[in-house]
Amino acid sequence: MGETMTTTTMTINLTVNGEKREVSIEPGDTLNFVLREKLGLTGTKKGCDSGGCGACTVLMDRKPVYSCMLYAAKADGSEITTIEGLQNDDDDDDVKLDPVQKAFANHYGLQCGYCTPGFIMLTKALLDENPHPTEEEVRQALVGNLCRCTGYTKIVEAVMSLSERRR
Ligand code: FES
Ligand code: FES
């Protein structure tokens, strides 16, 4: 006699980049899966998928989280910010970039760019909490995010430029 497989789905409510979203998920879905595959927000990357690289970093209620390590069900009711949610309406340029995005671009803090959304979201959270960190504090804060291209020097320079501008 054949067995019948049943799939349990549930609905969660998120505010993603300021927009209320109701999403149907399965219990094992991660926030990373939901953002990328269900909401089409592919700016958030998936790297190691096991908490070791930080490429998937987003903000949940303004705090950085590895979206690959968080069950979407745990994010129910929370406010999520992804790289797509950053913009600066005061900017005169056609492409409206957040100051953190601009700093990474101006200081060559990226090469292939795969790690960049994670670093930028982490930097947002760092500067929110500590508007002018020292270089040591920046290096410490970014330690969980890996970059295979830049050697980190340019990334740290980008974050330090923001730290100094805020003084
Ligand atoms: S993809 Fe989440 S930590 Fe690497
Ligand atoms: S810029 Fe390529 S991994 Fe960081």
Image: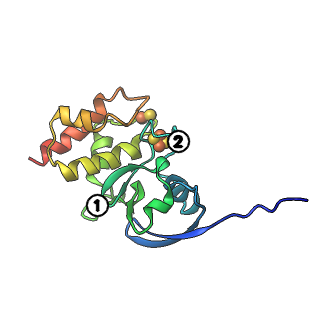
Residue tagged by mark 1?
A: 88
> Relative to residue 5, is residue 39 drawn left or right?
left
Q: Which x, y percent locates residue 31?
A: 49, 56
Callout 2: SS: loop
Q: In this view of the protein, which residue sits in the foreground, 36 or 159?
A: 36
* Disc 2 Cβ-to-ligand 1 distance below 8 Å: yes
Q: Which x, y percent locates residue 109?
A: 33, 36
- Can I make out residue 114 in this image? no
Res. 148 image quadrant: top left
91 is higher (above) or lower (below) than 165: below
69 is higher (above) or lower (below) than 95: above
61 is higher (above) or lower (below) than 19: above
Marking on residue 49: 2
Q: Which x, y percent locates residue 69?
A: 47, 47
Question: Identity of the amino acid at label 2?
Answer: Asp
> Relative to residue 107, is residue 135 drawn left or right?
left
User: Which quadrant does ligand 2 occupy?
Assistant: top left
Q: Earlier in the sequence, mark 2 or mark 1?
A: 2
CB atoms of marks 2 and 1 within 8 Å: no
Question: Identity of the amino acid at label 1?
Answer: Asn
Q: Quadrant of the N terminus?
A: bottom right
For label 2, the crowd category at 10 Å Cα-Cα, with few meaning under 14, some 14 to 19 and many 20 or more, is some
Q: Residue furthest front?
A: 1
User: In percent of the image, x 81 and y 62: which residue is there?
Assistant: 4
User: In percent of the image, x 55 and y 60: which residue is there?
Assistant: 40
Q: Residue furthest top?
A: 151
> Relative to residue 67, is residue 154 drawn left or right?
left
- Can I make out residue 166 in this image? yes
User: In percent of the image, x 27 and y 51: which residue is there?
Assistant: 125
Callout 1: SS: loop
Res. 94 image quadrant: bottom left
